[in-house]
Image: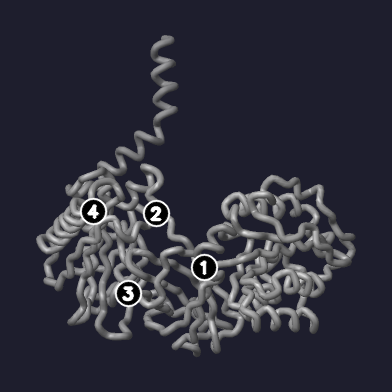
Amino acid sequence: MTTEKNMFKYALKYLPLIFVVILLSGCGNDRNSAKFIFMPVEIRERSIFVDSEKFPDEVVLFFCASDFAPSDAELTEIIGDRLDNIEFSAVRAIPESLDILVFIEDCSGSMKPRLRQTDRIIVELARQFGELNAAIVRVGKHPVIALESTRCSKLAQIQLDTLEYPSPKGTALADGFELANEIIGEQSGAIVLLADGSISRTVKLAEQTALASKRGIPVVALQMDGCESGALKSISKETNGFYAHHEVNSLAEILTGGWTVSYKPVAIDTNGAEHKIVLRWGAQKRLGAYKAPGTPPPRAPEPEPVLAEEINIPVQLIEGMRVPFVETGNVEILRAGREVLDSIVFMLDSYNIPVGAKLAVDGYTCNIGAENYNNSLSLRRAKIAANYIRQNCADGIQLIIDGHGEADPIMPNDSESNRKANRRVEIRLIMEEKEVEIFTSHPGKSMRKN
């Protein structure tokens, strides 16, 4: 009886795992069963912060990527069944060479619970940028210079809560900016503002922002709490700086790879519609979204299923999909990779792909191994994925096959799990036309007519 109880206890413990194994076994053999598993292996894409307050005149994007190459990048907006490739301008948030960073800490009453956190952010940054000079200005009822210009290596050793704090009854931010501009003087510098959402624009603050902009001093605004602050966003934008809300990026990331991208949308009469953003360069991409002002029109009734040839391109093919290879040196298509490829084959066979469209198949490796070996390995991975598509796709499509070795990693090659993610093949549809229609599929609904 004791043995039977133990067996029952273990069966209950591992029942979820058994269920997952059975589920995977049941959907692995039939290629059509994978037709809506568009991303069976999902690697978290790092997001873009979108400022669309000035829509339709301008949309501003803030994101971090140390390897971003504006000249090689493509910016796409997707609105319903419309796709637009858009020209943009890009500015690095912080110049590559700096003499000094000036931190402005908001020490008003509303920020009191956050001060330990802001001090910790400053110390962590100082540890990474030991040779850089930094100063700290704290603002409350009045501004105080809590720390004169000091090497970051020394700043990291200081207990910041022992430095002077102003009275919390107020936020003299404009006066704090004036002190920061004076500290930087003729040096190459930047201002890092750590505040919450209670900041408001004043005439003096606008004047000090304009002075920083004129002297080429970018402002990085890290908003620690509250709703998105229009004042902080405008200060960052006017100085070609960077805005981050609720610490969406680490400060070190922003200083080494923060970018501000501005563009004018092509589609501007989209009342209340969601604009999806895809920013791509090499194998990298960033995703974002915003809603246009206005009220969207009432939704039409769900249409009846239609013939495959009447359906347009699913957005997954435009954004791109990944085939995982996981193990070092592996060129065999794994089960998860086969599901991705089956999804791609199903979409190519089921949707009306325009004449002239091409499928880009790009192979990649991690950083283990010699450069020549990795270049060859990545190309072999791309070829085997391309051959799978060619052999299983009913309608022919032109394939562009290339191998990039260890270039363009999607994750830093600093751990085995990250290196596994970098061993992959990227597949996406390339359109020659500037505008094509797309179709966002609804999982669980078959697009074929019975």
Q: Nearer the viewer, mark 4 or mark 1?
A: 1
> Answer yes or no: do the residues labelled 4 and 2 have beta carbons within 8 Å?
no
Q: What residue do we see at 40% from left, 43% from top?
A: 415
Judged left or right of residue 189, residue 322 is left
Say whether disc 4 or disc 2 marks the residue closer to the N-terminus. Answer: 4
Question: In front here: 93 or 43?
Answer: 93
Judged left or right of residue 395, residue 104 is right
Say whether disc 3 or disc 1 marks the residue closer to the N-terminus. Answer: 1
Residue identifier under label 2: 411
**Visible in this render: residue 338?**
no
Instruction: Locate residue 311, reporting x and y percent.
Output: 27, 76
Q: Nearer the viewer, mark 3 or mark 2?
A: 2
Any mark on residue 96, and which? 1
Q: What crowding class fits label 4: few (fewer than 14 Cα within 10 Å), some (14-19), or many (20 or more)?
A: some
Question: In front here: 105 or 243?
Answer: 105
Amino acid type of disc 3? Answer: Glu
Secondary-structure class at tag 4: helix
Q: Quick one: quadrant of the C terminus?
A: bottom left
Residue identifier under label 4: 371
Q: What residue do we see at 66% from left, 78% from top?
A: 234
Secondary-structure class at tag 2: loop
Instruction: Locate residue 150, reporting x and y percent.
Output: 70, 56
Say whether disc 4 or disc 1 marks the residue closer to the N-terminus. Answer: 1
Amino acid type of disc 4? Answer: Glu
Any mark on residue 304, and which? 3
Q: Nearer the viewer, mark 3 or mark 1?
A: 1
Instruction: Locate residue 273, reporting x and y percent.
Output: 50, 80
Q: Is residue 59 above or below residue 128?
A: below
